[in-house]
Amino acid sequence: MAEETSPPLPPPSPAFLEVNCKNSGKTRRFAVGTDAGFAVSLINRKLIKGNPFTSHIESVKEGEEPIAFGPSSVLVDYGEGWKLQTVIESDLGFGVKTDEDVPAMKTPIPIPLRVPSVKSSGAAATAKRVSQPAISILYIGKIVLAFTLIFVLGAIFTLALENLPSLLLFIKSVM
């Protein structure tokens, strides 16, 4: 029996990706599946004063058009000859990092939970809003009436309790 020879297996791909940083000259390593936006913000945070910011990451190969990674793209290795590198803001016409600068962090745009709906487009449906004061004369009148009734009831109970002993004597004498 002849032994079958299998073609040599390619070496396993590393569990990380290397990004060449133009602005610092260093090579940064990121795990496979890292978001490009996270990688850019991490690179920008580690910059020293005077270095330009990284705007995005792209994959380049000699003789090919570069592939740009957006902020929510996942970093991938396209194979032999492709290298990941940063694009610095000075190439795009932006400034360099100073002490006052903070790395650009993406903040989500608040989305309204409920969009108001249009009920009618007719002119008859438009109603004028009349602003009413928070405290009206009617409101004050109701409060004054409530206090008056409370004091009247208090006076009635006070008179009844003051005259209770004489009322009990009258009832006892009649019986």
Image (cartoon, rainbow, N blue to C red):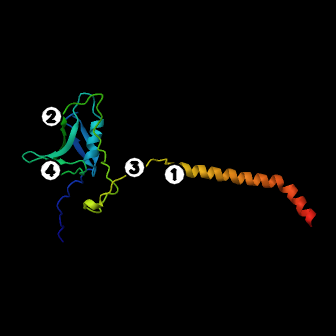
**Separation of residues labelled 3 and 4 (CA atoms):** 71 Å
Secondary structure category for the residue under label 1: helix
Q: Which residue is mark 3?
A: 131
The mark nearer the N terminus, 2 or 1, is: 2
The mark closer to the camera, 3 or 4, is 3
The mark nearer the N terminus, 4 or 1, is: 4
Q: Which residue is mark 2?
A: 93
Q: Which residue is mark 1?
A: 138
Which amino acid is tagged 1? Answer: Leu
The mark closer to the camera, 1 or 3, is 1
How far from the left and from the top, in percent, is residue 88? 18, 37
**Separation of residues labelled 3 and 2 (CA atoms):** 53 Å
Query: What crowding class fits label 1: few (fewer than 14 Cα within 10 Å), some (14-19), or many (20 or more)?
Result: few
Which amino acid is tagged 2? Answer: Gly
Out of 84 and 130, give the one closest to the viewer. 130
- Is the C-beta separation of discs 3 and 4 under 8 Å? no
The residue sitting at 26% across, 46% down in the picture is 37
**Separation of residues labelled 2 and 1 (CA atoms):** 67 Å
Secondary structure category for the residue under label 4: loop
The mark closer to the camera, 3 or 2, is 3
Secondary structure category for the residue under label 2: loop
